[in-house]
Amino acid sequence: MLHAAYLMPLFPLVGFVVLVAIGRRVGDPVAGWIGTIAVAGSFVVALLTLIALSHQPEAHRVFLHNYFTWFHVGGLTVPIGLQVDQLSIVMCMFITGVSALINLYSIGYMKGDRDYSKFFIYLNLFVFSMLVLVLANNLLLTFVGWEGVGVCSYWLVSFWFHRETAASAGKKAFIYNRIGDAGFLLAIFLIFEKTGTLQYQGGPGGGIFGQLHHLGGGTATAAVLLLLFAATGKSAQIPLFNWLPDAMEGPTPVSALIHAATMVTAGVYLLCRMNHLLALSHTGTEVIAIIGGVTAFVAATIACAQQDIKKVLAFSTVSQIGYMVLAVGSGAYIAAIFLMVAHAFFKGLLFLAAGSVIHGLDDEQDLKRMGALRRTMKWTSVTFTIGWLAIAGIPPLAGFWAKGDVLDNVYAHYKVLWALGLLTAVLTAYYMSRLQILAFGGDERWKEIGPHGEPALHTPHESPWVMRLPLVILAVAAFFAGILNLPWAHRYSFDAWLAPVFSGSLYRDHIHNGGLWALAITDAVAAIIGVVLAVTLWRGTVTDKARLEPRFLQRVWYWDDFYDAIIGRPSQKLASFMAWVVDVRVIDGAVNGAARLVRSTGTATRKLQTGYVRNYALGIAFGMAAIIAFMISRTWWS
Amino acid sequence: MSAGFPYLTVLILLPAAGALALAIIGLDKRFSKEFGDVLAIGVSLATLGVAIGAVVAMKVNVGGFQLTSNHIYTGQALGVRWNLGLDGISVFLVLLSAVLFPLVLVLGRHKTNARAYAAWLLLLEAAVIGSFVSLDLIVFFLFFELTLVPSYFIIAGWGHERRAYAAIKFFLYTFLGSAFLLVGILALAFIHESQTHVLTFSLPALMHTHLSDSTEILLFLAFTSAFAIKAPLFPFHTWSPDAYTEAPTEGSVILSSLLAKLGTYGIIRFDLSLFPHATRTLAPLMLTLAVIGILYGAIVACAQRDLKRLVTYSSLAQVGFIALGTFALSSQGLSGAVLLMVNHGLIVGALFILIGFIYERRGTWQVGELRGLQKVAPVMAAVFTVVMMASIGVPGLNGFVSEFLVLSGTFITHRWWAVVAVVGVIIAAIYLLWAYQQVFHGEPRAEDEKTKDLVWLERLVMAPLIILIVFLGVYPKPVLDRINPSVNQLVAHVEKATGHYQPSVATKGTAGLGGQP
């Protein structure tokens, strides 16, 4: 079965091609089903591959295969090849699984859209690119997938392109990602220069990981920081995080799939994949941990003050990925992957449930206009509740175990960051409970006239089964995903399964059993404090609480304004200056000035006027033609 | 004398004869306009057939010149030879020319005085192909100059409002460069004659001329000024915004896709072969100009409100990348530069054609006057998106591979230039996405609603370009396998002459990715 691993990316690729060819003709809902089946097929292959891999002895759980050579220049050969190992198959499992569910959900959500089939074209191309990203056996092919998901993200964020905000958000997402990508490219160049290869492992010389001894300490740190920079773009971390909230302009299934469950975790995946390199740079990993910890905290504070249901979830995503990056920086790669998988389930669920709310409320996204939805949207509200408890870290749901795993490791490494992480955990429980109360508790505010005179909304309706089924499946997963890596290790727990991938570079904390219990109880208490705080502050009928939603937080710490002031506006001025002063007046001015000088100094050259140049040109034409004709005639003669 | 079918001579004579025939039947009223169309397009398609034949006939894994013709015709006294040859550096430029001319002839067939237009285009094709295959410096110079004439008449005769100004500026500016080139060629040949007592203009022979350092640098500057203007490289570019914008669509396509490549091709073919020391010495200067061009072109493109000018400046940045890869003097950089010449030709050609489609429908290429076209012309939008993504350098499309090779090849030998140039990759996304958003996104206004989508003939013109853009992105190997031997030979020549070798990592091979795990 391992040899058929290529079928995983192939299915969505075929789905993409088929939909490009006939998507518009078959339309709604057949196009959606084609897309869903392609991705579901990919999930089945992933499952079979996982089973096959688990039947291998532990030392042989890496399958490397090159299918063909992409290009070969000088000493650089780039194959199109796959690496199926414990890490990539875990990624594939949740990527294809969640993608299949979200494809199914989209069949209902996108119903009636004028570009219905196009949506599934992009979605299939996205899944293909994501699988290339995680399955690639070399850095450059990973970069191909990395760029591919970025492009799909651009198309899907600006899917409703007639809306100015959506078009701008798509562009912003692309450009922020592109800035990070520059770091990725430079990292590739640097690694290739030092190791002479781009393949992760295997092959002559053992690939990058076999050649790491060629890297000095400074080079290793530089490479790690460049990769981190790439990750901050794709995974929406400080300093490049502020494209993600804007990306919520995309249809909600896109937010769930790309901007919560899969694509935004690519940066974390990349850092995990390069763990042997990270292990060489202490400075590098410290910076990673700080970036992650600070991002987790900052984004969580912002999430406390957002009005838009999707914006809360977006900042929550930034914050949760911050936890993952923090875990990577602490050497706790398995904890990072564990949280990534758990997060894919509960955040995917939360977004899809939010989509169901938006769908049921005539596209209203303002929390302040929701309320009491538990009465009309039973399925949505129950599943959302599970997602809420999971992310808040209430035991025994997935979030408690996954976040706990991260925090335990951070505690052993960086005490200050651990404290920040714990505070973030309180905030997480707080903002999610606020969201839960505003949307599903309280009064039926959607019956009222809106704050800006918007008419009352229709009575919310529950969504169709294609949308409810994914909610239920994800809710079950979000509830039980803790099993994947309980502290009492079992044979197939992540700890046992993933350890060979990280081997030497994996940090293992040595907290004794009592300490672990104490930390677990601390986590649970933090979660409960957050929930209680929110219930105390947001219970009741008043929803306008300016003191709890300071402007500083609503405006995202003025981050966008700051970038606009120091980069955006100055560079616009620079561009205008270069275009209209330097280019037109200085460079072209010098050229035209020289021409004028020539013209005014000689009377003979005054003939350089339209008609004369024309004659001149004709003169050349006839002259050349005569010479060439002569040459050719001589050629035949000789 | 080489045996076999004289592909290269035919490649030059066929379009030239077509041009002549069109000129003759233009005088005779009995021939219909359609006959002229069929003749012109037929000749260009036949040329394409011969070009494909030439590519097939070429051996892979051979670095030197193939399919050569070599005839003396001026006697030993003058030493000029009809010396043609094709290698990995020129072959795909010839093929690109042969692909693009039929397309522009199809597009241009409704112009007023269409027969003259087609005749000039065919003459231009002969001159362009002639320039790419000439191995005799005088013959090269003749073709190089000959390209000016049809270009001038195409701009001045069929261009837009300020065509007269643009045409004269283009003509005089490039002509000035050519004067330096001619002086350089003659000086080199006479120096060679004084050493060997043989007067020759043959490139392979002149490669063995002994030059003092200062002479070599002077000659390098003479050659390079002509090529830098033609390409154009920063800061010799200011004729191009006027010429590209005022030229008719077909003219813009040929100017930017092919004539610009004459400049970069000239640098690779002649500067590197004839003046390796000077190339090496002045590489930091040329790399700096290249990087400035990349950033400058991209930044100025951001301020443009006119699609044609925007593409012109993006083209300036791309030419900067070609120069960067060239003067990196590593196999990867140079292979990337050669591949980028072809890729950029396809991309910029496709962009100018698409902008031409917009202009035909709306009579404007001002970004501010267009809006929401994706809603009314989805096919045009899709095609534009693919070409735009290729230009931005998205993997899977052709632009990426060449850009990657150029940058990684530069990184190995001149790290900091590559680091700065990477910024240009970011900015390319900014202005293109901005332009796309302005023109295609948003809600169409009343005048936008009437914009028709691409008709089948227009789709047919775009199809080969899109297919090549995707193919060269997914599977560039067959092309690179033909480019590499010639590039390696050239890099080895420069290395041997200067004694400077590229770092071993690029040629190590054993630690590369080649082996099966």
Image (cartoon, rainbow, N blue to C red):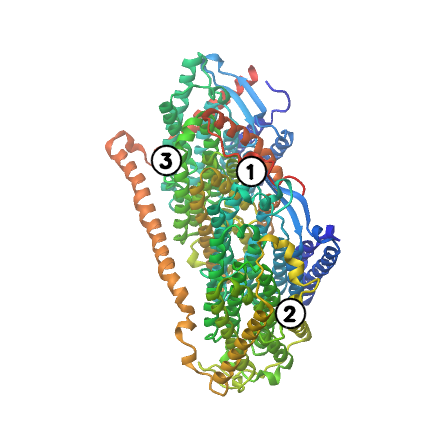
| Quadrant including the N terminus of chain B | top right
Confirm whether circles 3 and 2 share one chain: no
Chain identity of mark 2: A
Residue A284 x, y percent position in the rendering = 48, 54
Residue type at numbered disc 2: Gly
**Residue B372 placement, left or right of A401:** left
Instruction: Identify the element where label 1 is drawn.
Output: helix
Amino acid found under the numbered disc labelled 3: Tyr
The quadrant of the picture occupied by the C terminus of chain B is top right
- To which residue does mark 1 refer? B96
- Foreground residue, A461 or B441? A461
Contact between marks 1 and 3 (CB within 8 A): the answer is: no
Q: Position of residue A111 (x, y in %)?
A: 63, 70
Asked if residue B323 lies left or right of residue B459, the reply is left
Q: Which residue is mark 2?
A: A482
Q: Amino acid at mark 1?
A: Leu
Residue that label 3 marks: B173
